[in-house]
């Protein structure tokens, strides 16, 4: 769809975007964060909180795919030899199940292991971009910027987990690179509800200092309604 759409109820003020120049970004919807036995659970988190967004995110993905717009999935994971995992990252967290250790879903946060895979409900479709990232932000150590720019992408809609870590970091990195960014309120989640609320408030404060927010229903309605 090559048309200007408006989300009139977006915060802090209306957001306009053209799906032909916008990517839906799905951050780290991996088994390691969303299912028991993975990295998120090893840190003592209640992973069921994150599972709750899957139906809304799937509905948004379906509507986005229906207009043929770009989708980018990211996976936070490391090389099997851990060459891209600094000790400063690996040595924090749970000493009995660190990044690279063998867990119930294979080696924790290692590319190619079952836990690093995207959950089946949100599996990438053929042709969608899938990028492994060693950091919290999606631009660090990746070719995301080149992939987006060569597709003419100027606007990004952010979803995925966790709101205040990888989603917020990626949205801030994108804002600094000149992308117009919106976070989908019910398409993202945190293990800590108060952190999600604070992240959404920080991102949209001061006249959209990092970007906008809106519910998935507003995006879906705009896609289905079209311009006008
Ligand atoms: C975390 C992420 N929380 N994907 N990663 O360590 O947000």
Image (cartoon, grey):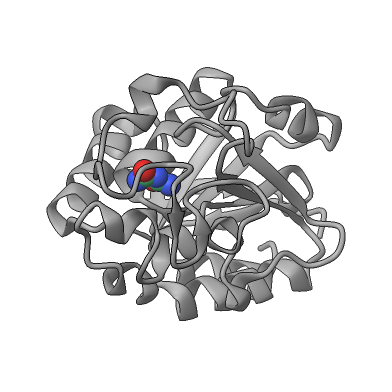
Residue depicted at x 78% and y 67%: 125
Q: Quadrant of residue 59?
A: bottom right
Residue depicted at x 27% and y 48%: 96
From this viewpoint, is residue 30 visible? no
Q: Position of residue 186 (x, y in %)?
A: 37, 66
Q: Quadrant of residue 21?
A: top right
Q: Nearer the viewer, residue 196 or 85?
A: 85
- Does residue 36 lie above or below 15 as drawn? below
Residue depicted at x 58% and y 48%: 75
Q: Nearer the viewer, residue 96 or 89?
A: 96
Q: Nearer the viewer, residue 110 or 124?
A: 110
Quadrant where the C terminus is found in the figure: bottom right
Quadrant where the N terminus is found in the figure: bottom right
From this viewpoint, is residue 51 visible? yes
Q: Nearer the viewer, residue 186 or 190?
A: 190
Residue depicted at x 48% and y 42%: 100
Q: Position of residue 181 (x, y in %)?
A: 51, 38
Drawn side of residue 142 relative to residue 213, left or right: right
Quadrant in which ligand 1 is drawn: top left
Q: Position of residue 85 (x, y in %)?
A: 50, 27
Q: Position of residue 162 (x, y in %)?
A: 36, 51
């Amino acid at each position: 769809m090559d048309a200007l759409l408006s989300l009139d109820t977006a915060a802090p003020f209306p957001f306009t975007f053209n799906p032909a120049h916008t990517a839906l970004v799905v951050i780290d919807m991996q088994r390691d964060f969303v299912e028991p036995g993975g990295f998120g659970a090893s840190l003592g988190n209640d992973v069921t909180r994150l599972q709750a967004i899957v139906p809304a995110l799937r509905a948004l993905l379906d509507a986005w795919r229906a207009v043929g717009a770009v989708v980018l999935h990211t996976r936070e994971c490391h090389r099997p030899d851990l060459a891209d995992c600094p000790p400063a990252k690996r040595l924090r967290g749970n000493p009995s199940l660190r990044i690279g250790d063998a867990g119930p879903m294979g080696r924790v946060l290692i590319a190619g292991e079952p836990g690093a895979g995207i959950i089946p409900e949100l599996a990438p479709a053929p042709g969608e971009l899938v990028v492994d990232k060693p950091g919290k932000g999606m631009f660090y150590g990746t070719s995301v910027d080149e992939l987006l720019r060569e597709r003419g992408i100027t606007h990004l809609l952010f979803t995925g987990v966790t709101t205040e870590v990888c989603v917020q970091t990626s949205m801030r990195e994108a804002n600094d690179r000149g992308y117009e960014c919106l976070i989908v309120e019910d398409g993202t989640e945190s293990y800590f509800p108060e952190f999600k609320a604070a992240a959404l408030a920080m991102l949209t404060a001061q006249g959209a200092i990092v970007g906008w927010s809106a519910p998935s229903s507003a995006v879906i309605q705009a896609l289905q309604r079209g311009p006008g």
